[in-house]
Image (tube, rainbow, N blue to C red):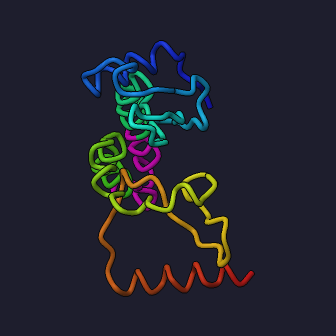
Amino acid sequence: MWSVLFTQVCQTTEKELGKSIDDVFMDFVRTPSATASIAQVHRAKLIDGRDVVVKVQHPGIKTIILEDLKDVKYIVDWIAWPDPVYNFNPVLDEWCREAPKELDFKLEEVNSSDRLQCFPRCFNAGNFLVTKEAPHRPILLDFGLTKKLSNSVKQALAKFFLACAEQ
């Protein structure tokens, strides 16, 4: 994974907040705590003393993702052309419809509200946290792309997670 230069992080953060970094944060860690394909996160301390994590989207990532989707669409069409049994267009269509949600951090904020209240008592493990205190509980992160699930799918997922936990 790649890390964005801190000057770009500052520019992006200031543009989104409409304020200078110094007006919002008393401390902003220059080195990202984690970085992934779409964004990276930095620990920071607000002016009022609260510890926060700031998720900053990589510059130009929306264009890159849209180009990648266009390329994948071309490949899928090329693969399915001689043998329609290999038509992955329904999966690709779903991906194309949902990808913009992954890039919408305001939507992620709405989807994740109230789910991160235990953050000070947890450690990061990818797209979920696990509480430090027993019983160790997973806390899911990254709510940019969420779906409403039917009860049968919820039950299947619950059985899957239980089976994983028992192994």
Q: Residue at x 50, y 62 (%)?
A: 118
Q: Is residue 167 left or right of residue 122?
A: right
Residue lying at the far front of the rendered structure: 48
Residue 4 lies, in percent from the top left, at 53, 21
Residue lying at the far left of the rendered structure: 18
Find out whether residue 140 is within the magenta segment.
Answer: no
Quadrant placement of the N terminus: top right
Residue 60 lies, in percent from the top left, at 39, 22
Magenta residues span 73-90
Quadrant placement of the C terminus: bottom right
Q: Is residue 120 left or right of residue 100?
A: right
Q: 88 and 54: which one is in front? A: 54
Q: Is residue 53 above or below residue 152?
A: above
Q: Residue at x 32, y 81 (%)?
A: 150
Q: 28 and 90: which one is in front? A: 28
Secondary structure predominantly adopted by residues drawn in magenta: helix
Q: Residue at x 60, y 51 (%)?
A: 126
Find out whether residue 88 is within the magenta segment.
Answer: yes
- The part of the image, by quadrant, that contains residue 13 is top left
Residue 86 lies, in percent from the top left, at 46, 57
Residue 90 lies, in percent from the top left, at 33, 58
Q: Residue at x 51, y 83 (%)?
A: 158
Q: Is residue 27 left or right of residue 144?
A: right
